[in-house]
Image: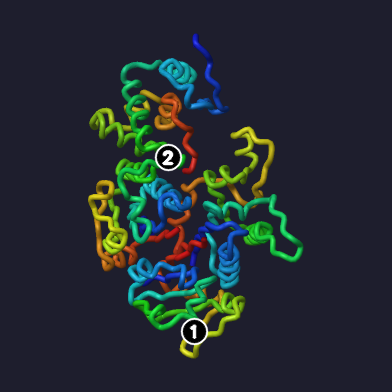
């Protein structure tokens, strides 16, 4: 049983303590809306219990952001796919 | 109603909660064809005291629990409260007790 | 999969309502079903017929209305959130003696009981806010 | 389908209306016989603070409303220890019947069963 955490706030407005307490190693994290600014954050900020991290492409494009080679993006179809692979979704906004 | 007739909304709840007093309770009860006795007053007073502290309207389930907590299992059951206040006891008791109309959230 | 979407942001208060409708469109396109849209808190503004947008901006309430009608979705607007924000259907207008109606007919003003009921028939619930 | 709902409460009581919205979901879920687990993390733990006099700001007292959960048969109420410590709070500052738990327990609670609602 694993969860998908959908993060919609920028790194500077996200409470890491709460978020990191909630994310388990089997979970995945999807950054949407202002959450895609996490793509520009340093490794310490992206240091979640899971390395399964994704960025929503529409929100990246909207903000003029590019990903590093090791980072993974997906569109809304990919977002839907992700929700089918995890039993629960937890939104952080 | 000798003193005054309080203003009511279309569902018979007090428009102005400050209008409530024991006489208003009698008036509201009469509109529901309920004759207030000691058993009714016990419940009304409990509800008002509860609302004073917690300021929430109770659904039937919680209403029954409250009466059970205060007066034990004989009175803390739907059957007893429905005998006193009819089919939706939490709603009717709140109305007579001069508490806000539940927000109908359910 | 059967989804319930809980929309908790107004169309004007950021991107969340837009994300929700994009997600709903993608899910339906892939053949999933939406058990219920539940508009809660500020989200009830997504059901306002009285929203006027400049011609070059999206009118999200109109988009929701179209999506709901086209796919025959169950859409509930939380009554206690709605009436305190002026989202009123004919029944609430009568109940509270108001002269205007402001809720799209494709949505129904209802209670949290509808949400709880939908959750029993739902595989995934997603909140947008 | 399991009839369990886990509510994650992470908002201050008066900073917006999401704290109250979450509570209303708890009441509704209990009325329809779902098991409710109520998890307070982050700023949500401020909701549990005793001795709130919200009438000072014309609001309803949130902790007093949370105390009515008991009447709905909801007794699974958890607060994250780290969130309390971060805010210089301990169990004595909170309303009754709250269990203080660590983050591993929170992750277990979030791992199911049932749905999670996190407003």
Residues at circles 2 and 1 in contact by the CB criterion of under 8 Å: no
**Residue occupying image coordinates x 69% and y 40%:** C100
**Residue occupying image coordinates x 37% and y 41%:** D53
**Chain for disc number 1:** A
Mark 1 crowd level (few <14, some 14–19, many ≥20, 10 Å Cα): some
Residue C80's disc is none
Give the image quarter of residue A26: bottom left
**Residue occupying image coordinates x 47% and y 32%:** B100
Residue C33 in the image: state x and y as whole percent.
Answer: 54, 64
Q: Is residue B77 left or right of residue C116?
A: left
From the image, which quarter does the N terminus of chain D lie in? Answer: bottom left
The answer as to whether the residues below labels 2 and 1 share one chain is no
Question: Can residue C109 be seen from the camera position used here?
Answer: yes
Q: Which residue is mark 1?
A: A72
Residue C60 versus residue B18 in the image, above or below: below
Q: Quick one: SS at disc 1? A: strand
Q: Quick one: SS at disc 2? A: helix
Q: Which residue is mark 2?
A: D56
Estimate the spatial distance between the alpha carbons at disc 2 and disc 1, rounded to whole Å.
50 Å
């Amino acid at each position: 049983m694993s969860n998908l955490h959908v993060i919609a706030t920028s790194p500077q407005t996200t409470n890491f303590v709460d978020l990191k307490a909630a994310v388990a190693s089997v979970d995945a994290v999807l950054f949407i809306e202002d959450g895609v600014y996490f793509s520009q954050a340093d490794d310490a900020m992206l240091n979640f219990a899971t390395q399964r991290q994704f960025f929503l492409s529409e929100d990246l494009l909207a903000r003029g952001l590019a990903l590093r080679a090791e980072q993974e993006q997906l569109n809304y179809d990919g977002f839907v796919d992700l929700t089918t692979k995890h039993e629960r979704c937890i939104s952080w906004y | 109603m000798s003193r005054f007739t309080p203003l009511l909304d279309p569902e018979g709840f007090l428009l102005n909660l400050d209008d409530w007093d024991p006489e208003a309770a009698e008036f509201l009860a009469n509109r529901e064809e309920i004759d207030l006795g000691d058993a009714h007053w016990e419940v009304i007073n409990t509800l008002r005291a509860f609302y004073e502290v917690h300021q929430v309207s109770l659904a039937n389930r919680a209403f029954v629990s409250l009466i059970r907590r205060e007066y034990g299992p004989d009175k803390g059951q739907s059957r007893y409260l429905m005998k006193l206040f009819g089919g939706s006891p939490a709603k009717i008791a709140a109305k007579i007790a001069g508490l806000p109309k539940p927000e109908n959230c359910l | 999969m059967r989804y319930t979407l809980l929309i908790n942001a107004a169309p004007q208060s950021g991107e969340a309502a837009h994300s929700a409708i994009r997600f709903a469109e993608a899910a339906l396109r892939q053949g999933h079903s939406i058990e219920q849209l539940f508009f809660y808190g500020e989200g009830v503004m997504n059901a306002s017929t009285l929203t006027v947008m400049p011609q070059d901006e999206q009118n999200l309430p109109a988009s929701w209305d179209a999506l709901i009608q086209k796919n025959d979705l169950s859409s509930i607007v939380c009554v206690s959130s709605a009436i305190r924000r002026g989202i009123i259907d004919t029944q609430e207008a009568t109940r509270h003696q108001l002269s205007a109606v402001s809720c799209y007919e494709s949505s129904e003003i209802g209670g949290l009981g509808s949400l709880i009921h939908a959750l029993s028939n739902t595989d995934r619930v997603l909140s947008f806010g | 389908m399991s009839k369990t709902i886990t509510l994650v409460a992470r908002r201050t009581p008066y900073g917006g209306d999401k704290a109250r919205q979450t509570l209303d979901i708890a009441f509704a879920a209990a009325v329809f016989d779902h098991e409710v687990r109520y998890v307070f993390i982050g700023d949500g733990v401020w909701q549990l603070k005793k001795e709130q006099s919200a009438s000072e700001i014309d609001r309803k007292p949130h902790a007093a409303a949370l105390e009515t959960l008991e009447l709905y048969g909801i007794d699974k109420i958890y607060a994250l220890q780290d969130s309390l410590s971060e805010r210089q709070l301990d169990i004595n500052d909170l309303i009754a019947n709250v269990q203080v738990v660590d983050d591993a327990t929170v992750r277990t609670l979030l791992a199911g069963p049932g749905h999670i609602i996190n407003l």
